[in-house]
Image: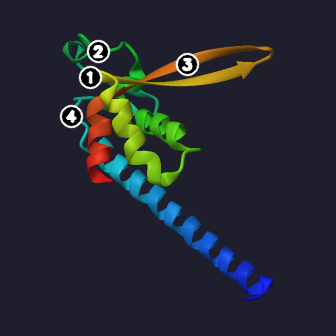
Amino acid sequence: MTYDYLNKSFNELANIKLNLERDMRLAFMDAAMSSVADNPNPIRRINEKCFVMNFSEVIGKPLCPAFFDWGKSVQTIMQFLDRKPVEEWKRLLEEKMSMAGDVVYFSFKTQNKGYSYTENYPVDKRLITAIVNKL
């Protein structure tokens, strides 16, 4: 076996891995978007940045619009999974679900001009459960 043959084989395997990861990301997005379509929260979307819902749906839940907008929640989950290996996604989401009640918080650290802060984004546990079941 020559170096060129091994290098070519390695590159082919790396390309196969990239294609599988791309397919996994697409499958995740399909599962997530179908979950968004099945959103049990009775929101009525006015436009991309505005929706209306009954006040009774807000009682006992976080007062954060992103919690009720599952499209934004999917973006939060994708941001969480972005730099993680694809084969770990299901396990990571299951760990997040086991740590919380009905609301799962995703924390992201941000640094800006010499100081850092943490932002917490609430996500409905039903959305994560639906995504995990479809993966």
Q: Return the x and y of residue 46 as percentages of the image width and height.
A: 37, 31
State left or right for residue 45 relative to residue 60: right
Q: Secondary structure at mark 3?
A: strand
Say whether disc 2 or disc 4 marks the residue closer to the N-terminus: 4
Frontmost of labels 3 and 2 is: 3
Q: CA distance from mark 2 to mark 1?
A: 9 Å
Say whether disc 4 or disc 1 marks the residue closer to the N-terminus: 4
Q: CA distance from mark 4 to mark 1?
A: 14 Å
Q: Crowding near pointer 4: few (<14 within 10 Å), some, many (20+)? A: few
Say whether disc 4 or disc 3 marks the residue closer to the N-terminus: 4
CB contact under 8 Å: marks 4 and 1: no
Q: Which kind of residue does numbered mark 3 sit on?
A: Glu
Q: Which kind of residue does numbered mark 1 sit on?
A: Asp
Q: Return the x and y of residue 22 as percentages of the image width and height.
A: 52, 62
CB contact under 8 Å: marks 2 and 1: yes
* The label number, if any, that marks residue 102 in the structure image: 1
Q: Return the x and y of residue 51 as percentages of the image width and height.
A: 36, 26
Task: Specify the quadrant that holds the N terminus.
Answer: bottom right
Circle 3 residue: 119
Q: CA distance from mark 2 to mark 4?
A: 14 Å
* The label number, if any, that marks residue 61 in the structure image: 2
Q: Secondary structure at mark 2?
A: loop
Say whether disc 3 or disc 1 marks the residue closer to the N-terminus: 1
